[in-house]
Image: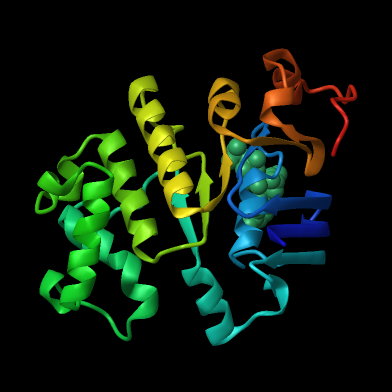
């Protein structure tokens, strides 16, 4: 069974068709990369996976559930299985690194937490374990805004992992980073994805990164899937064609 399945999903914002009859399957354990020009629908597609966006028509199934039909506790339960990493990290700069990672457990806890000690000990320990995995245990008690961009993104990955996701979504996770930090973060996502058997769906702008780290490349243009192929079968030139603004046919979909 696929971890993520889109069946003819069309979603519009006023006159803009952000997704246009999108169908795709991402098997469990696969690292799939979304490529496409700005505005081609990558973020919108990702937001359908954890129910932040509902399909206008068609259906989205994630880990066996029809996301569009989920509400309340069921939707929250699915979201706990889907981690999300963003381009801008979304850390709280004035809090410690450890506390930021602990916020990844909030979806499973009742009520707000006013300080690090407000989190159960098991959560603090689990957060430290995840920080160690991303190589930042020594920075646990440092303010998050004192870290470099690459380190902050690794904290965001640790926060996403704290909820023990089965699916990891990443929306241009390395777009704000220098090339070395970007490569480190992609290495980390790929390594942890492999270790934990995660299904990863990641949007990227860097074709070389996509070919290096993705098992599968999905190209979007004006909301349509125009390319869907194993990365090993794709040349750099063919991948770059996704960025062409004309609608020349690309490699066969499928
Ligand atoms: N909430 C919204 N309201 C109105 N229009 C939206 C909304 N979200 C997305 N859009 C539009 O849908 C289209 C697809 O946007 P989306 O953000 O998914 O593209 P993207 O490929 O992720 O772009 P980028 O690479 O710049 O992040 C764009 O035309 C965008 O303006």
Q: In which quadrant is the C terminus drawn?
A: top right
> Is residue 37 at all visible to an observer of this figure?
yes
* Residue 26 drawn at (x, y percent): 69, 51
> Is residue 57 at all visible to an observer of this figure?
no
154 left or right of 120 in image: right
Q: Is residue 192 above or below residue 79?
A: above
Quarter of image, res 206: top right
Residue drawn at the location 74% of the way across and 59% of the way down: 5
Q: Nearer the viewer, residue 232 or 49?
A: 232
Residue drawn at the location 62% of the way across and 36% of the way down: 215
Q: Is residue 236 above or below residue 21?
A: above
Q: Nearer the viewer, residue 228 or 142?
A: 228
Residue drawn at the location 44% of the way across and 50% of the way down: 85
* Residue 233 drawn at (x, y percent): 74, 24
Q: Is residue 10 above or below residue 87?
A: below
Residue drawn at the location 67% of the way across and 16% of the way down: 236
**Coloration mode:** rainbow
114 left or right of 182 in image: left
Quarter of image, res 244: top right
Quarter of image, res 220: top right
Q: Is residue 47 above or below residue 72?
A: above
Outermost top residue? 237
* Residue 37 drawn at (x, y percent): 67, 31
* Residue 35 drawn at (x, y percent): 66, 33
């Amino acid at each position: 069974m696929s971890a993520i399945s889109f069946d003819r999903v069309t979603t519009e914002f006023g006159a803009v068709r952000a997704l246009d009859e999108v169908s795709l399957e991402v098997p469990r354990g696969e690292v799939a990369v979304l490529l496409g020009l700005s505005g081609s629908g990558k973020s919108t597609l990702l937001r359908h996976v954890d129910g932040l966006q509902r399909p206008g028509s068609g259906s989205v199934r994630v880990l066996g559930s029809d996301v569009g039909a989920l509400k309340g506790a069921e939707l929250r339960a699915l979201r706990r299985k889907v981690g999300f990493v963003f381009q801008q990290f979304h850390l709280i700069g004035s809090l410690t690194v450890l506390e930021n990672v602990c916020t990844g457990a909030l979806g499973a806890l009742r009520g707000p937490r006013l300080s690090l000690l407000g989190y159960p000990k098991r959560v603090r320990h689990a957060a430290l374990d995840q920080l160690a995995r991303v190589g930042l245990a020594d920075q646990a008690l440092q303010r998050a805004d004192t870290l470099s961009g690459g380190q902050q993104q690794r904290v965001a990955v640790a926060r996403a992992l704290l909820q023990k996701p089965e699916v990891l979504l990443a929306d241009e996770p390395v777009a704000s980073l220098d090339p070395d930090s970007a490569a480190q973060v992609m290495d980390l996502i790929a390594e942890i994805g492999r270790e934990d058997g995660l299904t990863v769906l990641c949007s990227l702008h860097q074709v070389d990164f996509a070919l290096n780290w993705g098992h599968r490349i999905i190209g979007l243009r004006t909301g349509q899937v125009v390319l869907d192929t194993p990365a090993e079968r794709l040349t750099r030139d063919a991948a770059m064609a996704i960025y062409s603004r004309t609608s020349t046919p690309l490699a066969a979909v499928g």
